[in-house]
Image (cartoon, helix red, strand yellow):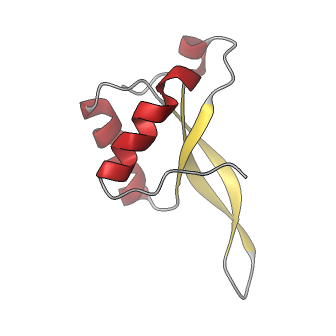
């Protein structure tokens, strides 16, 4: 279920996905809600483009660290490629 930042308190949340399109973000929201996972969505900027790099706005999805594995597994099973930290 989508939650506000206050729900998670002082936890450092895990970034699990960056949706680049509204339809993608809405689909992911439905998936996470149906899976019973609490998540936070915030708009933020990312760099995109291969030849012409530009700054774009996407929907950044976060979960509590304890839910990161389950959330990424849910994404993978449903055709989403979870965000990987370098």
Q: Position of residue 81 (x, y in %)?
A: 46, 57
The residue shown at (70%, 13%) is 10
Q: Residue 80 versus residue 2: which sits nearer the camera? A: 80
- Quarter of the view holding residue 52: bottom right
Where 54 falls versus 6 (above or below)? below
The residue shown at (58%, 55%) is 58
Q: Position of residue 36 (x, y in %)?
A: 30, 25
Where 18 falls versus 74 (above or below)? below
Q: Position of residue 71 (x, y in %)?
A: 42, 36
- Quarter of the view holding residue 57: bottom right
The extreme left residue here reads: 34
Q: Residue 10 versus residue 5: which sits nearer the camera? A: 10
Instruction: Report the side of 28 relative to 72 (left or right).
Output: left
Q: Position of residue 74 (x, y in %)?
A: 34, 41
Q: Quadrant of the N terminus?
A: top left
Instruction: Report the side of 76 relative to 59 (left or right).
Output: left
Instruction: Report the side of 19 relative to 49 (left or right).
Output: left
**How many numbered marks, from 0 up?**
0
Where 69 falls versus 3 (above or below)? below
The residue shown at (29%, 40%) is 30
The extreme bottom residue here reads: 51
The residue shown at (68%, 48%) is 85
């Amino acid at each position: 279920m989508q939650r506000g930042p206050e729900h998670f308190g002082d936890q450092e949340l895990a970034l699990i996905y960056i949706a680049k399109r509204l339809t993608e973000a809405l689909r992911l929201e439905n998936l996470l809600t149906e899976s019973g996972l609490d998540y936070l969505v915030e708009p933020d900027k990312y760099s995109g483009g291969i030849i012409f790099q530009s700054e774009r706005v996407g929907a950044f999805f976060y979960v509590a660290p304890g839910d990161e594995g389950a959330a990424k597994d849910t994404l993978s099973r449903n055709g989403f490629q979870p965000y990987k930290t370098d």
